[in-house]
Amino acid sequence: MNRIVAAAALLILGVQAAALTLPDRSPLPWLAGATLAVALLAVRWHVTRAPTVLVDESRARDPEETLRRWVARTQTLVSWADSSRADWDKHLRPMLARQFELATGQRKSKNAEAYRATARMVFGDELWRWVDPDDVALNERDKPGPGRDVLDELLKRLERI
């Protein structure tokens, strides 16, 4: 789109420069108008034409491929639960906090106290510490994460909301 506008501006300037060399300059406004009309038609064509699809729809709708991706993503999430606290804090904690915000409608940025109170009602103090986005422990990064059982309980509680 920017290229079309730049090319149109250069074309108008070129037509104006060429028209200035004519002995009779009365057709100058007509030439500029015609050039501008062509440029506007090119922009209109560019805006209204059908967008080109770059995604291969045949593969995206394949149920087997979708299921395969889902299984791989789930296996990765479970492996992070069994991994270190650093992996939990980096991958699972933000995902769980985001899912909690979506499920409850409580946004931490709007009312942090209501957000924490709702979280404690849903998870309890023991489980909330694994979801709380502010409880990232930088000095305990090498310790093991809470494990699959905690992830399972957190997901069950999110599911009940």
Image: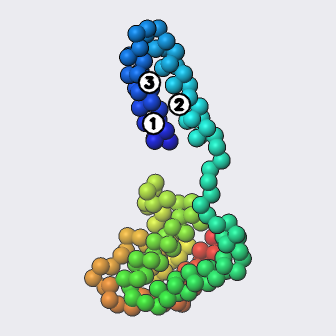
| Residue 11 point in image, percent of width and height | 45, 30
Tell which of 70 and 139 is nearer to you. Answer: 70
| Residue type, mark 2 in image | Ala
Q: Considering only order in the chain, which callout, 1 or 3, is on the residue closer to the N terminus?
A: 1
Label 2: which residue? 39
Kindly identify the residue that appears in the image at 54 percent across and 90 percent down: 149
Q: Can I make out residue 152 in this image?
A: yes
Tell which of 32 and 27 is nearer to you. Answer: 27
Label 1: which residue? 7
| Residue type, mark 3 in image | Val
- Residue 29, above or below 66: above
Q: What element carries label 1?
A: helix
Kindly identify the residue that appears in the image at 52 percent across and 90 percent down: 148
| Residue type, mark 1 in image | Ala
- Residue 148, above or below 93: below
Q: Considering only order in the chain, which callout, 2 or 3, is on the residue closer to the N terminus?
A: 3
- Residue 94, above or below 24: below
Q: Are marks 2 and 1 in contact (CB under 8 Å)?
A: yes
Label 3: which residue? 15
